[in-house]
Amino acid sequence: MTVAVCGSGPLLALANVRDPDHNRVVEFFRGTRHTIVVPTLCIGEVAFLLARDFGPEGEALFLESCRSLELMQPSEAGLARMAELVRINGDFPLGAVDASVAALAEELGTPFVVTLDHRHFRAMRPRHVASFTLLP
């Protein structure tokens, strides 16, 4: 089974039934044959946004659902690569969370990134492949 690294956008859409991408993301997660890995930084970002939009109960429900996710913290090399990506892509600006997704994909050697943010991930040039394969 191939690995795909998931960013914050799909997790947020999955948690919010009013999100315009909710149904598409639900269908993707139900039917995917990829092992989905989530950088831990994404959890903090999604929890913050859900707390802002839905209060503590929305945030708590999301955090409980994270128990079923395969979470990965950035390694020391991953943190260095994240800093490099933030600098290289400073005109976006890219930001730490998206950089963590890209760095983890590189570290795991996968071209697959689950994201709704095509602008940032299409512009990045990963070290291990010509470009990321964006899902869904």
Image (cartoon, rainbow, N blue to C red):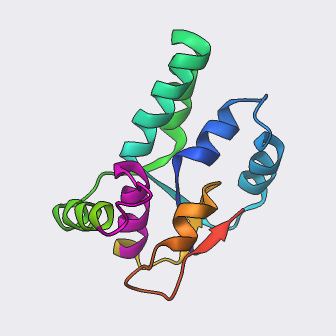
Q: Residue furthest front?
A: 91
- Expressed as whole percent of the image width and height from the top left, the position of residue 41 reads 37, 44
Residue drawn at (72%, 62%), measured in percent from left and top?
A: 136
Image coordinates for residue 95, horizontal then vertical, percent: 37, 51
The magenta stretch spans residue 98: yes
Magenta region: 88-106
Residue at the spot x=44%, y=79% of the render?
A: 125
Q: Quadrant of the N terminus?
A: bottom right
Q: Is residue 33 magenta?
A: no
Query: Which secondary structure dominates the residues rendered in magenta?
Result: helix
Q: Is residue 26 above or below residue 90?
A: above
Res 61 quadrant in image = top right
Residue 5 vs residue 39: left or right?
Answer: right
Residue at left offset 34%, top offset 60%:
90
Question: Quick check: can you spot residue 3?
Answer: no
- Residue at 53 percent of width and 66 percent of height: 121
Relative to 6, residue 45 above or below: above
| Residue 70 in view in this figure | yes
Residue 38 in picture, x, y percent from top left = 47, 52
Count of labels shown? Answer: 0
From the top left corner, tell me how far across and down residue 123 is, in percent. Answer: 52, 72
